[in-house]
Amino acid sequence: WTLARLLRSLDLGGWDGWLRLQYLHPGGITPDLLEAMASVPQIVPYFDLPLQHADQAILRSMGRRGDAESYLRMLGQIREALPGAAIRTTFIVGYPGETQERFETLMRFVEEARLDRLSAFRYWDEPGTRAAELPEQVPGDEALDRLEALMLLQADISLEINRGFIGAPMRVLVEREDEETGQPVGRSYRDAPDVDGEVIIEGKAPEPGSFVTVRIAEAEEHDLRGVAEG
């Protein structure tokens, strides 16, 4: 069995819910999988892809395939097959051997890839691991500076993407009421629990667990705000 075959075998009938695939390996993103995802309306076009880096030498040192060029091709295939797909990833900065040039490869990739969401972590030297024995260890303060630069770049990208939804209707799953304001709060298909943003809803919304159409009025780096319709 493949994941694509499994998705096609789902008998969801008229179920009006969402299925979200989490933590997909980049090597498993194939035309067959994308076609299968597009064929099942309940599967949201959301991709959580742990790329880890974009420089080929660093990725090989991590024991991973891929590079910036192949990752950009993959992202293009996703967006062509599933327009509006939301894409998040995770990177490690300061990995042994990450020269300034290799870090700049990562920064150029992030700027060109225009990812919806990005999490990043500073490499941490863990005794007993293979990476701890590698040469060219990056000083901790330098790694922290790189982490900050990367997240500032992504903050601008995420805000720009979110602003593109202002004025548009968005289907939102109501999840809770804000404890302080009492406002309904939910998530769009672009927002996975615990790691992504939320949609703060103005006006009357249905009970948690229900869907509502929200007209987006304001955008922040992570969250959106809008008015419930209907």
Image (cartoon, rainbow, N blue to C red):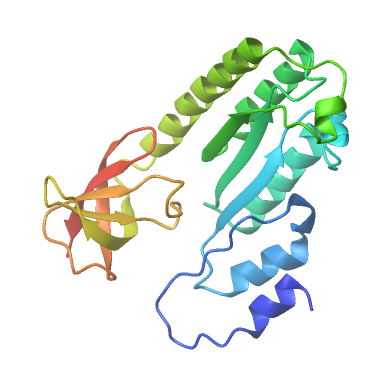
Q: Quadrant of residue 203?
A: bottom left
Q: Quadrant of residue 180?
A: top left
Residue drawn at (56%, 54%) of the image: 83
Question: Residue 25 placed where, x, y %?
Answer: 73, 54
Total marks shown come to 0
Question: Residue 142 placed where, x, y %?
Answer: 65, 11
Q: Is residue 118 above or below residue 31?
A: above
In this rendered view, identify the residue nearer to me: 171 or 54.
54
- Quick check: 24 left or right of 157? right
Question: Residue 38 placed where, x, y %?
Answer: 60, 68
- Quick check: 23 left or right of 1? left
- Quick check: 91 left or right of 157? right
Q: Quadrant of residue 125?
A: top right
Locate the C terminus and report the quarter of the image it occupies.
bottom left
Q: Is residue 140 above or below residue 43?
A: above
Residue extending furthest toward the front: 128
- Quick check: 1 left or right of 198? right
Locate the N terminus and report the quarter of the image it occupies.
bottom right
Residue drawn at (61%, 74%) of the image: 39
Q: Is residue 45 above or below residue 168?
A: below
Residue drawn at (62%, 16%) of the image: 146
In this rendered view, identify the residue nearer to me: 98 or 139.
139
Question: Residue 112 placed where, x, y %?
Answer: 64, 29
